[in-house]
């Protein structure tokens, strides 16, 4: 067999089993899927905010997430 780079040749005929199909959804099912999609978006956003370090977009802390620490050398409170 000739070697073809970048092309896939289906020798086992897996593609013969593929058949596209359309789903017929009721109004209730459409609404349910849209609600689920919105919930997943909010969940992913919360997860990103938690892991990414805040909503500043640069991986830094937001004003709410900054911590106050006492600087013993200066004798003052500093925000980190």
Image: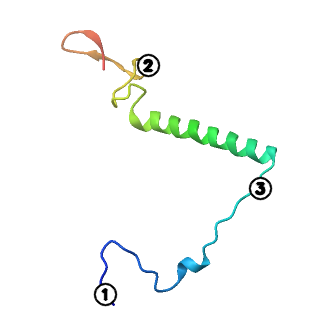
- Is 24 above or below relative to 79? below
Residue occupying image coordinates x 40% and y 17%: 63
Q: Residues within 10 Å of mark 2 (few under 14, many from 20)?
A: few
**Which marked residue is nearer to the observer: mark 2 or mark 1?**
1
Q: Considering the image in quadrants, where does the C terminus appear? A: top left
- 40 to the left or right of 54: right
Alpha carbons under labels 3 and 1: distance apart: 44 Å
Q: Which residue is mark 2?
A: 64
Of the numbered discs 3 and 1, the one sitting upstream in the chain is 1
Mark 2 / mark 1, whichever is N-terminal: 1
Residue 34 location (% of width, % of height): 68, 41
In the image as oriented, which residue stretches furthest toward the left?
73
Q: CA distance from mark 2 to mark 1?
A: 63 Å
In the rendered image, the vertical position of residue 49 relative to residue 11, given as above or below: above
Q: Going 40% across and 22% down the picture, which residue do you hit? A: 62
Q: Earlier in the sequence, mark 2 or mark 3?
A: 3
Q: Nearer the viewer, mark 3 or mark 1?
A: 1
Q: Residues within 10 Å of mark 1 (few under 14, many from 20)?
A: few
What residue appears at the point 41 percent right and 28 percent down from the top-left corner?
A: 54
The answer to whether the residues at label 2 and label 1 have Cβ atoms under 8 Å apart is: no
Query: For this view, does 71 lie left or right of residue 57?
Result: left
Neighbours of disc 3 within 10 Å: few (<14), some (14-19), many (20+): few
Tell me the SS state at disc 1: loop
Quarter location, residue 79: top left
21 displayed left or right of 47 = right
As helix, strand or loop, the secondary structure at mark 2 comes to helix
Camera-nearest residue between 66 and 27: 27
Circle 3: element type? loop
Q: Which mark is residue 24?
A: 3
Nearest the camera: 21 or 31? Answer: 21
Of marks 2 and 3, the one in the foreground: 3
Residue assigned mark 1: 2
């Amino acid at each position: 067999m000739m070697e073809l780079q970048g092309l896939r040749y289906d020798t086992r005929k897996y593609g013969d089993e593929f058949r596209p199909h359309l789903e017929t959804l009721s109004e209730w099912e459409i609404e349910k899927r849209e609600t689920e999609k919105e919930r997943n978006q909010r969940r992913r956003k919360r997860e990103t905010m938690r892991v990414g370090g805040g909503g500043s977009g640069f991986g830094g802390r937001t004003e709410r997430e900054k911590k106050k620490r006492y600087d013993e050398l200066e004798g003052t409170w500093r925000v980190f």
